[in-house]
Image (tube, grey):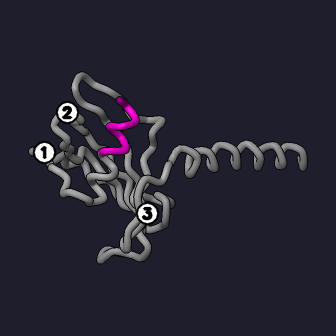
Amino acid sequence: MRKLLAISTFVFTVIFSSTSSAEWTQVAENVNGIYYVDFGRIRKQGDYIKFWELVDLLGPDKDGDLSYKIYQQGDCKLFRYKYLSSTSFKQPKGGGYGTEYNQPDEGWRYPSPYSINEIVLKSVCDYVN
């Protein structure tokens, strides 16, 4: 029984530790938080790319959320992006249960110069090119 418990604990630890932190790479940081991209899950679809961003806030926002995972579509040729879906979390690094929002942007967003969005999109476009 102890052996089974030890094996189960080991398997649980390996599975959940690798999915929670191993794939996220920090690409930016500011006074609001730390921004990560999962480069292993970037997908090219025609002229576009789709990717995941994790925003880890330094303090809770007005809704008490501490992190977000945002699924985005990027256009590296015209350097623009749109949000496809997002999930907010009450714990850091996307921990705990999330509240999902599936209202994709209708139009494209263009990142402001020197903004976090510009840094994130540039890092993703550089990776695929």
Residues drawn in magenta: 122-129
Q: Identify residue type, mark 1.
A: Trp
The crowding category of the residue bearing disc 1, from other C-alpha atoms within 10 Å (few below 14, some 14 to 19, many at least 20), is some
| Disc nearest the viewer among 2 and 1 | 2
Say what secondary structure mark 2 lies in.
loop
In terms of depth relative to the viewer, which is nearer, 11 or 82? 82
Q: Position of residue 93 (x, y in %)?
A: 49, 60
Cα distance, mark 2 to mark 1?
13 Å
Residue at x 16%, y 37% (from the top left corner): 78
Q: Identify residue type, mark 2.
A: Lys
Label at residue 118: none
Label at residue 34: 3
Q: Do the residues labelled 3 and 2 touch (CB within 8 Å)?
A: no
Residue 30 located left or right of residue 107: right
Q: Position of residue 57 (x, y in %)?
A: 41, 68
Cα distance, mark 1 to mark 3?
24 Å
List the residue tagged with mark 1. Answer: 108
